[in-house]
Image: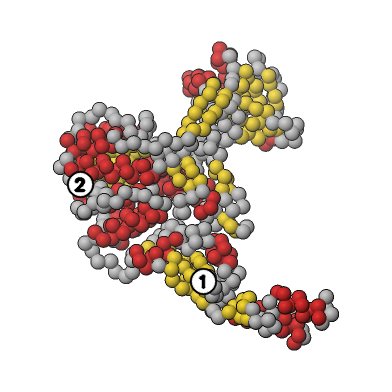
Amino acid sequence: MPPDAITPIALSDPRRAARQALAGTPVDPTSLIEYTAGERLLVIGEDHRRIEYAVRQAAPLQARVLCLVTDKASHRPIAGATTWYASRATVQLSGWLGAFRLRLAGQADDEILFDQVLDLTNQSLISVELPPPGYLAAGPDQLDQQLDDGLATLKDLTGRFEKPKYFQYDPNICAHGMKGATACTRCIDACPAGAITGLVDRVSVEPHLCQGGGACATACPTGAMTYNYPSVEDSLERLRRMLRAYREAGGKAPILLLHDSERGTALADDLVRADTRTARRLLPFALEELASLGLEAWLTALAYGASAVRLLGHTDIPQASRAVIDDQLLTARTIIGGLGYPASALGWLGTEGVDVDEQGPGAVMPELSPARHAARGGKRQILFQAIDHLHEQSFQEVQGDALPLPEGAPLGNALVDENACTLCLACVTVCPGKALQHGQDVPQLRFRESNCVQCGLCVQSCPEEAIRIEPRLLLDADARNAVRLLNEDSPFHCVRCGTAFATRSVIGRMSERLADHAMFATPESRRRLQMCGNCRVADMMQSGEI
């Protein structure tokens, strides 16, 4: 069901107005990914009876079947299909609908292509939570009827198909790695489909494997990975209009109920029909996948006037997506709790059949003046807009100028040991958000906290181990956006030509470390450490050393 689908339900006027506003808000289209699949079916398994049954059931489907038996103890051919034999350890299977690739290690180098795969092995050859389209794992525990249904599904997957391209990726702000150091792997860890792999300084996403879970974009601290179906900006605009329509129609204290657009829709409709005081304030909002909205969207919904945000859970949500949502919830609840609001205003709505009134009366926000801004800009701009509005509206004075956040939160500070830092600026060259900056024409290390995503690349790149990071939320927006000085030094000038080429701390540290080196045993050679590169070469030539 598409995100803007509406199920007929008896609604109060405010909720009806909210739904009408939601349905009338357009969503920008995204590009499409194409699959083209024929009828080449690969059946893999150990159990001859199961394989033979599958081949017989596939015959009426006119599929061209090849069987691969991974039990080498038996070489009995499978009637009605070409039969190969190989040990499981040699089988390498990858790909997606219309482009599955089979390679048998140690045998021919050629790959064999298939359109669909029926995997009857005891342990699936492709073991990700969301397997690729066209791949059906029907192990030994499935009944024959389930196998029949699966084969019919595979038969339907012939022809040409299109699906949305769910993501956009900007490698220029990716925090995965830089200069051989790997830091952020959040999108890789979050993807239940195994569609994302790490390269040296960026990641690669295979769009044919992507199932649109959205957890990658939610987990991404920089906004390099964004969700596209719909975009976060479109979703928040729909939320803003829905909450405004609800409020203008006389509704009070709306509870935003986020749910996925398949199983979650039916569960959400059941909850909305419940005749309870809390249920009558529920505003369901369908997403393609629950994990496609995270921290910045939840806080923006509260800033727009939602009294609570509930995430409708059920057993079909991938565990990788749940883990991302839980991490985001921990950070979000820490922020709103630190601002003086009930942390329980954000959270799961249990599992199937949970009465929403069990959340309790203290689990909602006080009535605030709703934010009027449209959520625009990058991920972090949207997040800080929401935080600043909630901070301004808070009835409670916050102690201190910063809120400590859980480890792994994408906001925070960088601290530098001035005695250890030589201002080599290796940290500046790897910082993906440009939080660490140099001092232009003077030896300085500067820092803009609003840009720091706590990826840790600066810590890994520092040769002096002079940097550490600290997850926190600096509450003052001006201070957060200001560029502040972390360390500075005076320039060191070449003792021969007078050109500034390093800092005094770098030259001092280098002279100290090389004092006992055989190449710098004489006063003349030690003096070269105080020369720029050109003068150093010239001095060595004049002395006849080169």
Where 194 falls versus 424 (above or below)?
Answer: above
Percent position of residue 95, x then y: 60, 33
Q: Give the residue furthest to the right.
A: 544
- The C terminus sits in image quarter: bottom right
Residue depicted at x 23% and y 44%: 244
Tag on residue 253? 2
Q: Which of marks 1 and 2 is nearer the N terminus?
A: 2
Residue depicted at x 32% and y 43%: 237
Residue situated in front as seen by the camera: 521 or 136: 521
Residue depicted at x 26% and y 61%: 392
Binning the other alpha carbons within 10 Å of mark 1 as few (below 14), some (14 to 19) or many (20 upward) gives few
Binning the other alpha carbons within 10 Å of mark 2 as few (below 14), some (14 to 19) or many (20 upward) gives many
Amino acid carrying mark 1 in the image: Gly
Residue 256 in sight = no
Q: Are marks 1 and 2 in contact (CB under 8 Å)?
A: no
Asked if residue 340 lies left or right of residue 209, the reply is left
Asked if residue 135 lies left or right of residue 326, the reply is right
> Which residue does the numbered mark 1 point to in the structure image?
439
Percent position of residue 288, x then y: 39, 36
**Which element type, helix, strand or loop, lies under badge 1?**
loop
The image quadrant that residue 65 belongs to is top right
Residue situated in front as seen by the camera: 101 or 91: 101
Q: Give the residue furthest to the left.
A: 250
Where 332 falls versus 499 (above or below)?
Answer: above
